[in-house]
Image (cartoon, rainbow, N blue to C red):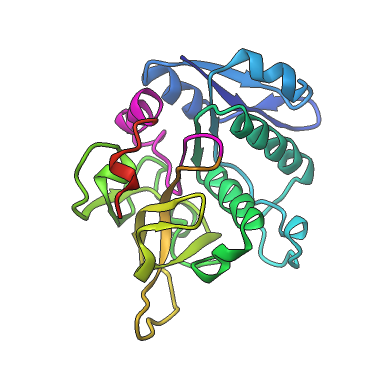
Amino acid sequence: MRLGIPLSSSKTQHYVNQAYVQYVAESGFDPILIPPELPVDTALDSFDGLVLPGGIDLDPIFYGEDNYTSYSSDPDKDEFERKLFHAVRLAGMPIFGICRGFQLIAREYLESDENMDEFLEFETHISSHNQVSDQTLARNIHQHFVDYVPAVLYGGDSNEVLSAPVNSMHHQCLIADFKRRGVLGVRAFRMAAWTRRGLKLKSKKGSYPVVCEAFRILKWGAPILAVQWHPEEIRDHELLRQFFNAGTKTKALETT
């Protein structure tokens, strides 16, 4: 199976963190690098699924918000990856988002369904998640724990809530209301992992806000899984394999 990975651009080079290429290859797939100059329709013929990698912040201006917390942004990169994402989604190919990829999918999803504002909110800055900078930890070091549902994150039948360490490196985040942890919305948004780390919002009666660390979207044209941490750095090959090899089997995921 061929998995496309979009490239970033500098003044003289195209580039991507080699960890993503190694992650795809070590998981048993063929990495296909996609330059922004390649027409999207042409690019679709070269791969069977898409990996949206991490990277710099999305530009909040596109979503109607002041840009006062971005560490860096590139509107041209945003436009390229948005077009690529929606083209792949409409073509029905599976899409796996990592960190920035998670955030791009989340923001586009919120733009597409205003009813989700009741349950999901994108926050442009949250503290205590980028330990690579705050504690000078290596990218492959686990930094905090998330709660997760194996059936949603890896597939299978277990809906037991478990805990696992991850290596988050983000300061923007998606906040979800824990009281609706099941399937949300007409397109079936399903939270797969979450944490309270860095969240200052207090719980109110009947609600429990959390930082969403992983989600699936089941009914938006294509299978979609996104994680806020970096599985390519901690070599979680099972996550990628399960999604692209068996991720279309959604029977277990459609239970609430």
Q: Foreground residue, 5 or 253? A: 253
Q: Is 168 left or right of 121, judged from the image as shown?
A: left
Residue 115, image x, y percentages:
58, 65
| Magenta region includes residue 112 | no
Q: Is 6 left or right of 31, judged from the image as shown?
A: right
* Direction front: furthest residue: 186
Residue 189, image x, y percentages:
46, 52
Q: Foreground residue, 137 or 120? A: 120
| Magenta region includes residue 232 | yes
Instruction: Decide if residue 157 is in sight here.
Output: yes
Q: Foreground residue, 113 or 239? A: 113
Read off the magenta span: 221-247
Q: Going 70% across and 25% down the picture, which residue do you hit? A: 14
Q: Is residue 126 above or below residue 240?
A: below
Residue 94, image x, y percentages:
50, 30
Quadrant position of the C terminus in the picture: bottom left
Kindly indicate the quadrant of the structure image that contains residue 231. Answer: top left
Residue 126, image x, y percentages:
51, 67
